[in-house]
Amino acid sequence: MNNLVVGTAGHIDHGKSSLVRALTGIDPDRLKEEKERGITIELGFAHTAVGDTRIAFVDVPGHERFVRTMLAGVGGIDCVLLIVAADESVMPQTREHFDICRLLRIPRGIVVITKSDLADADTRALVAQDVAELVKGSFLESAPVLEVSAATGDGLDRLRDAIAAQVTHVARRPVDGGARLPIDRAFSMKGFGTVVTGTLVAGRIGVDDQLIVQPGGRVVKVRGVQVHGRPALEAVAGQRSAINLGGVEVGDVSRGETLLTPDTLSVTRRVDAEIDLLRSARRLKHGARVRLHNGTSEVLGRVSIAGAAAEIEPGASELVRLRLETPAVLTRGDRFILRAYSPPITIGGGMVIDAAPTRPGVRSVDGRGSLERLRSTAGETAALLAMIEGAGLPGVSKASLVSRGGVSTARLPAVLTTLGHRAVRLVGDRLIASAYIAKAGDALLALVAASHKANPMSDGLPREEAREKIFARVAPAVFEMVVDTLKGAASLVGSDRLALPSHKATVAGADDQVKSAIVNAYLAGGLKPPDAAAIDATVKAPRAIVEKVTALLLREKVLVKLDTIVFHGAALQKLKEEVGALKGSAPGGKATVDVAAFKDRYGVSRKFAIPLLEYLDRERVTRRTGDVRLVL
């Protein structure tokens, strides 16, 4: 069957609840106080079927004190019944409810003139004129206008048919992807435990599903599902649903929270949006405190106007950042209502263009420009590109395209493919604009070049130093990808140290003489090399210069350090060849070397003999066996 969620809107005592009761046979006023006072205080719910269409009614309060409750019910509806009593015409809450429906972009509706039995034809005609003037230029301008009487039943059949006809014009809600149910009631049932109700606005919820209640992050398990008062295996988007939850107490769940699939929506305290201020509202100043209503939630926040403007004129649209005092569950494309902090009257509404912005402040020219690229008129791909570009080199995660960008999980692979064709690189789980990767590569090459200039005797910039200076705030995979790309293009070489291909470690001027003197001193020393003091005396240069040149020679492997002793590489190579030759001259080809024989053969002390023998072991020239070494 088709599903349609219908909400009522209108002034107090204009017959909303009576009409719902007449259409469904169910009394939506469920509280004793409501029945005693004759007004709706809480949300009421009822349902019926017309042909193959199941219709769920959300009956909202009309009293101005309960508009926040009305907002909790109107967010998930497909069609609104704007109700005006024939004996009173358009009243203050009629206008406010209508403004709310218009700001939330509710797609369709029907104007219902109730209590037709209490007014003559001329009065009803005047009421119709008032309504026509109210809805002129809005989504209700061409809507059906029907006169009914809940008391006599006149016009109810025509209204039922008109409601059922709306289902062919209402866009189907997305059932693929994450579930999202803004909670409008939470209660406990004996034998069942915690139950929450709401309109499932996206996805599906089935028995045994693991979901999460946000904000708060309470993980729950679905123990049972009811749709329109009947048990079901699952509820799908567009249905009024009651969900029996396990793993949570009723006191831990309340209206305003959202039941959803994990990691599918942003839990945020900062939102970029485009808002429309009502013509009847006062100027909205930068920094003003407001009430934001989305779904069934209400949170307080402050308005930061993008750019340098000090206020927003009545009737104007503007880009803003809303800084919320408590977390809200939002995603790109969500509609919301703004009410003044005090008195709490409706002043406007808007749409989320980024539910978790990473850009800095919006008061600058660049900040406003970033929001301009994200504004609601942009296509999805263009908006996601702007989001990725705004994040710079850190990029955005794939998961955030769902939670922050409003992309359904079912569509994510196709969106990633599209972005891949639009100069976006996927690095690990991060999406990064190719232009930023190219800039990072240029910056790394410039940093390496500067290092070569400052340290000509170094064979390159330490890899970790390069990462910390340019890539400290990005995922390690981004740094590795940039390095690999530059190496692949033959623009960079090295591993532990990064260098330009043209770079050769050099010493200049007098340092060339120092280098030659050091090399000759170690070469002359052979297997009994001079210590640091002897080198200083021979070279006759400042200690800092000697150390710098010695370090270069060690990196070039001209010199080799064994433990704390430095040898010339040629001396060690000659030693390897001589010891290796012992095997050929030994009886049976089995030659051994011990410490004493080694000392005598090469005229060295134990200080040199031990590190040299251990070096031969490491080079696989010898293998120690007890107190001797076997020549391999």
Image (spheres, rainbow, N blue to C red):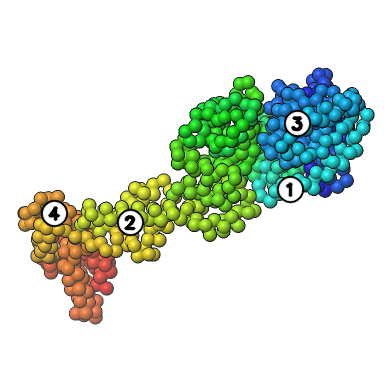
Q: Is there a contact, CB below 8 Å, between mark 3 and mark 1?
A: no
Numbered tag placed on residue 172 in the rendering:
1
Q: Residue 424's x, y, as percent?
A: 50, 55
Say which amino acid is labelled 3. Answer: Glu
Left or right of residue 172, residue 526 in this image: left
User: Which residue lies under the disc numbered 3?
Assistant: 133
- Figure quadrant of residue 195: top right
Distance between the alpha carbons at the discs numbered 4 and 2: 30 Å
Say which amino acid is labelled 1. Answer: Arg
Left or right of residue 533, residue 401 in this image: right
Which is more toward the observer, 460 or 275? 275
Which mark is first along the chain, 1 or 4?
1
Say which amino acid is labelled 2. Answer: Leu
User: Which residue lies under the disc numbered 2?
Assistant: 445
Which is more toward the observer, 109 or 509? 109
Circle 2 sits in a helix, a strand or a loop, which is it? helix
Distance between the alpha carbons at the discs numbered 4 and 1: 79 Å
Q: Is there a contact, CB below 8 Å, between mark 3 and mark 2?
A: no
Q: Is residue 525 above or below residue 292?
A: below
Which numbered disc, 4 or 2, marks the residue closer to the eye?
2
Other-residue count near label 3 (Cα within 10 Å), few / some / many at <14 / 14–19 / ≥20: few
